[in-house]
Amino acid sequence: MTACAWITHADCRLHEMGAGHPECPERLDSIADHLVSTQLMPYLAPYDAPLATPEQLARAHTSLYVQEAFAAAPAEGYLHLDPDTSMNPHSLAAALRAAGAAVLGAELVARGEVKRAFCAVRPPGHHAKRAEAMGFCIFNNVAVGIRHALDELGLARVALVDFDAHHGNGSEDILANDDRVLMCSTFQRDFYPFLGDEPLGHNMVNIGLRQGADGEALRDAVVDGWLPALERFRPQLVFISAGFDGHRADEMSGLRFVEDDFRWVTREIVGVAERHCEGRVVSCLEGGYHLFHLARSAACHVRELADLG
């Protein structure tokens, strides 16, 4: 069995939101180029991300929102969904591929074709709420994948781990109080989207970190907060919202993580998966905007997913 799938699609590079926008196509190029140059790519099994179907999207979003998102896609130019998020003529296809990647990842690991999957996709998803685009996100990729695993693949317990610098408020909005899901997250407190300190459901383990928090603070949050909850939950599959904007060089947050912190947290998540679900993990790219350190942080993450650490 190949240890890790690499799921992406060229459509994800065609979505862009204007000159100078930090959530840019070059993010995917930087990761892929670094994996090639460091000779990691040959260890990954490549897959094209399919288009998510309206039915799959509607497990995480309202049917009305899905219809509105399809109708909003512009024939030319840009259409703004919120102050930070817009669509160009290619954005709908990219968003469908991003959500479809999470669905395919769940299917691949559930069938045993691969042990883990990394979805190198954009737009990201963890801010997208049931009925609202937000924070660069159109569809909530991980929530679509999780609900597919639960509703279609027959799993009973799926965990979501989110280490993006910004709280995954959309994922929490969709998954709160779903007893089949445990969501564990760390994020910078008092920072966009200014949510997370008060969990919306009993199945949320939200740990806010102060501005300037470093890898030691991350380790404390994981060891003291996440791991005991994950061990009690005994997930049958683990999803990751993999955001690398907590790196100390990334101007999109005030956290002080370094590449080795992303390596360590990935190793801990993989360890939980090995103990409870034969190592099954699906990771979806979220944030990370300093291209040089995004590429290297993501490579540390992928190396652990592929058992190359």
Image (tube, grey):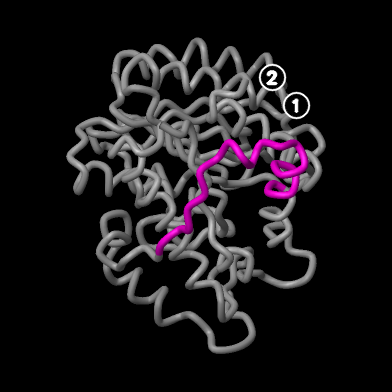
Q: Secondary structure at mark 1?
A: loop
Residue 12, how many percent across, how many down?
57, 63
Task: State the quadrant of the N terminus.
Answer: top left
* Mark before the other along the chain sequence, 2 or 1: 2
Q: Please report the residue visible at 49 percent of the width from the left and 80 percent of the height from the top.
A: 73
Q: Please report the residue visible at 49 percent of the width from the left and 48 percent of the height from the top.
A: 126
> In screen coordinates, is 155 left or right of 116?
left
Residue 217, how many percent across, how many down?
65, 17
Q: Secondary structure at mark 2?
A: helix
Q: Which residues are magenta?
A: 31-50
**Is 199 or 217 nearer to us in this picture?**
217
**Is 241 or 221 nearer to us in this picture?**
241
Callout 2 touching callout 1 (CB < 8 Å): yes
Q: Please report the residue visible at 40 percent of the width from the left and 45 percent of the height from the top.
A: 105
Mark toward the viewer: 2 or 1: 1
Q: Quadrant of residue 35?
A: top right
> In screen coordinates, is 22 left or right of 80?
right
> In screen coordinates, is 99 left or right of 134?
left
Q: Which residue is mark 1?
A: 258
Going by the numbered disc 2, the residue's amino acid type is Gly
Residue 305, how many percent across, how many down?
53, 29
Q: How many marks?
A: 2
Q: Which residue is mark 2?
A: 215
**Is 279 or 20 nearer to us in this picture?**
279
Q: Is residue 128 above or below residue 259?
A: below
Q: CA distance from mark 2 to mark 1?
A: 7 Å
